[in-house]
Amino acid sequence: MEDLLSRESVAAAVGAPVVSIKNVTHRYGATLALDFPFRGETTLNLLARLDAMVREANGALYPAKDGRMSREMFRRSFPRWEQLLKDPALNSDFWTRVAQ
């Protein structure tokens, strides 16, 4: 996975990403946002490899920015997710996919 984020490997897979790095206040660490054009299976494969890197680092994905986040990844990213079940206002396709 060392060359996963090399300019050449990302460009070959999906084109040049837009990159943003920010400090976070609600969790230890920083956030890295990568936005690329969607190129079907090639992009999905790259995102799956990035998810594996996030899991290995005990990181989290930002659900509002990830339309294909899996139930498993959401629950790993937000271990207290069940506390949100008490909020009846949460009713969306995303919530159905990751919480039910």
Image (spheres, helix red, strand yellow):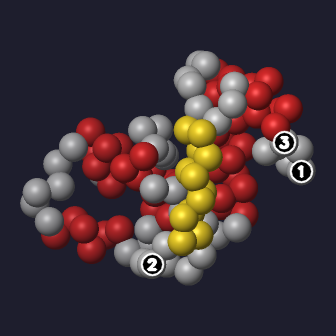
Amino acid type assigned to the residue bearing label 1 in the image = Glu
Q: Is residue 58 left or right of residue 10?
A: left
Tag 1 residue: 2
Query: In the displayed structure, would residue 26 be above or below residue 54?
Result: below
Q: Residue at x 45, y 72 (%)?
A: 79
State yes or no: discs 2 and 3 in contact (Cβ < 8 Å): no
Q: CA distance from mark 3 to mark 1?
A: 8 Å
Q: Which mark is residue 6?
A: 3
- Say which element carries label 3: loop
Q: Which mark is residue 25?
A: 2
Q: Residue at x 37, y 50 (%)?
A: 64
Amino acid type assigned to the residue bearing label 2 in the image = Thr
Q: Percent x, y for residue 92?
A: 21, 43
Q: CA distance from mark 2 to mark 3?
A: 28 Å
- Say which element carries label 1: loop
User: Mark 2 or mark 3: which comes first in sequence?
Assistant: 3
Query: In the displayed structure, would residue 65 be above or below residue 75?
Result: above
Q: Percent x, y for residue 17?
A: 64, 36
Eye-nearest disc, 3 or 1: 3
The number of callouts visible is: 3
Q: Residue at x 27, y 74 (%)?
A: 83
Q: CA distance from mark 1 to mark 2?
A: 28 Å
Q: Looking at the image, can residue 83 be seen?
A: yes
Neighbours of disc 2 within 10 Å: few (<14), some (14-19), many (20+)? few
Q: Looking at the image, can residue 44 be seen?
A: no
Amino acid type assigned to the residue bearing label 3 in the image = Ser
Residue furthest top as drawn: 40
Q: Percent x, y for residue 77?
A: 50, 64
Q: Percent x, y for residue 19?
A: 61, 46
Neighbours of disc 3 within 10 Å: few (<14), some (14-19), many (20+)? few
